Image (cartoon, grey):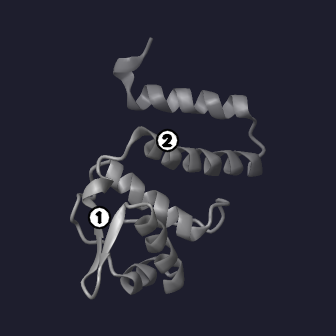
Amino acid sequence: MQFQISATDGVPIYQQIVNQVRHLIAAGRLQPGEELLPIRSLADQLTVNPNTVARAYLELERAGVVTKRHGSGTYVSDAASPLPLREKLKVLRQRVDSLLVEADHLDIDLDAVLELLRERHETIHPEKRK
């Protein structure tokens, strides 16, 4: 599992972990039954407090995305994949929020952000050009 954490994007670090785990599941890069990194290992990898990772895992467990097996670890729940559309949109909503906060910090207006999204979409999906 590879995470990209930003202390400056306006989203709490534990929520970034939650969002990225959900994204990895939705993308099929984390499969049902697959074990997540232990809390301390992930905290060391991200250089964050283990309590931050523990909070993220607790949020994921409450949402039914992962299950904890006492003494064994934390695993992707069988019910976690595939994510329903509302969960996928929730992940995207949080990423859009981060993008808009960053654009605001850079003093870039919404029209420029939307144009950039259109350009990037056409670059990534040239077959969908109108």
Query: Mark 1 falls on what kind of element?
Result: strand
**Marks 2 and 1, Cα distance to the nearest angstrom?**
19 Å
Kindly identify the amino acid type of the residue bearing the numbered disc 1: Val
Identify the residue shown where x is 35% and y is 55%: 24
Screen quadrant of the C terminus = top left
The answer, for residue 4, to whether it is visible in the render is no
Q: Residues within 10 Å of mark 1 (few under 14, many from 20)?
A: many
Mark 2 falls on what kind of element?
A: helix
49 relative position to 28: left or right: right
Q: Is residue 36 above or below residue 79?
A: below
Q: Residue at x 52, y 66 (%)?
A: 5
**From the image, which quarter does the N terminus lie in?**
bottom left
List the residue tagged with mark 2: 89
Examine the image and state in which quarter residue 123 appears: top left
Specify which label sits upstream in the sequence, 2 or 1.
1
Residue type at mark 2 is: Leu
Q: How far across and how far down the image is residue 47, in percent?
A: 50, 81
Residue 46 in the figure: left or right of residue 103: left
* Residue 76 tag number: 1
Q: How many marks?
A: 2
Residue at image x 62%, y 27%? Answer: 115
Q: Where is residue 63, by image quadrant?
A: bottom left
Between residue 111 and residue 72, name the one nearer to us.
72
As drawn, 57 above or below 101: below
Q: Position of residue 124 (x, y in %)?
A: 40, 32
Q: Return the x and y of residue 7 as percentages of the image width and height.
A: 62, 69
Does 86 sit left or right of 105 as displayed?
left
The x and y percentages for residue 98 are: 62, 51
